[in-house]
Image: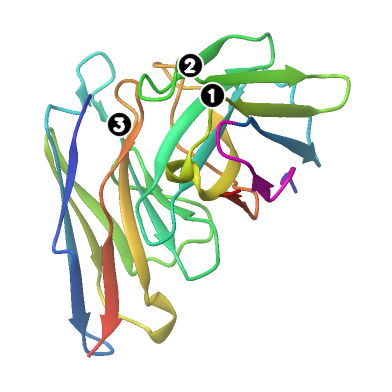
Amino acid sequence: DIVMTQSPDSLAVSLGERATINCKSSQSLLYRSNNENYLTWYQQKPGQPPKLLIYWASTRDSGVPDRFSGSGSGTDFTLTISSLQAEDVAVYYCQQFYSTPLTFGGGTKVEIK
Amino acid sequence: QLQLQESGPGLVKPSGTLSLSCTVSGGSISSGDYYWGWIRQPPGKGLEWIGSIYYLGNTYYNPSLKSRVTISVDTSKNQFSLKLDSVTAADTAVYWCARLPVTGTDLSWFDPWGQGTLVTVSS
């Protein structure tokens, strides 16, 4: 199984400041045949299902604000919220779809400082 | 707009079978462009993929649950279902159904998700 490790477990950021979440996979998620990284990011607010933010490591889903961005390749990935808003308080998960079983990171809780 | 809705008992006895259905509306489960899947989240814990199914019946299961899981599809009802046998308290979780776009490796990301249903395993 591909193990997904997120860091930090939680972080507190002031409104308008940058939040950075890291996700590391136990093996490369880069598919050589199409040069895509098989990595997704979700946002989960309390009492709600996760919401897709980013797929292919860096492609924002439709309607996702451009303050959210994904980067990285191979085994190291980052989700950045460029200017934290109050509505961004949530738990964020990465997920790999390079191989089965599909696996998720443990989550990173983002709060307001 | 595609919507998914889970349904089934919220309480299951230990050693019993957990059975849930997911009804898809606003789109056809027979679209060849998607897989359909189940994910769960124990209270206060992270996300676990259970398994996924294609409308033709092709399935992928998480090996950690494979011996106890069956996912099936009923295209006439635009539904797919989950059965989990021999449940214990460790199977207590919120269960979600979701759609997965087909990619080069078949499975991909989950979008959209149903609202989820809490299933408690208790006598």
Dot 2 amino acid type: Tyr
On the same chain, marks 3 and 2? The answer is no
- Which residue is tagged 3? A38
Query: Which residue is painted at 82% across and 28% down in the image?
Result: B78
State the extent of the magenta-drawn residues as a range.
B4-15
- Quick one: B85 or B62, which is closer to the camera? B85
Residue sticking out furthest to the right: B76
In the rendered structure, which disc, 2 or 1, sits on the residue that comes first in sequence?
1
Q: Secondary structure at mark 2?
A: strand
- Which residue is tagged 2? B60
Q: Secondary structure at mark 1?
A: strand
On the same chain, marks 3 and 1? The answer is no
On the same chain, marks 2 and 1? The answer is yes
Give how far across and how far down residue B85 sits, in percent.
57, 25
Give how far across and how far down residue B37 sits, in percent.
56, 31
Query: Which residue is painted at 63% across and 30% down in the image?
Result: B17
Give how far across and how far down residue A87 sits, in percent.
44, 80
Residue B50 falls inside the magenta stretch: no
Give how far across and how far down residue B123 sits, in percent.
61, 48
Do the residues under discs 3 and 1 have CB atoms within 8 angstroms? Answer: no
Q: Quadrant of residue B98?
A: top right
Query: Which residue is painted at 65% across and 55% down in the image?
Result: B115
Distance from the alpha carbon under mark 3 to that under mark 2: 17 Å
Taking the image as shown, residue B45 lies to the left or right of residue B112, namely left
- Which residue is tagged 1? B52
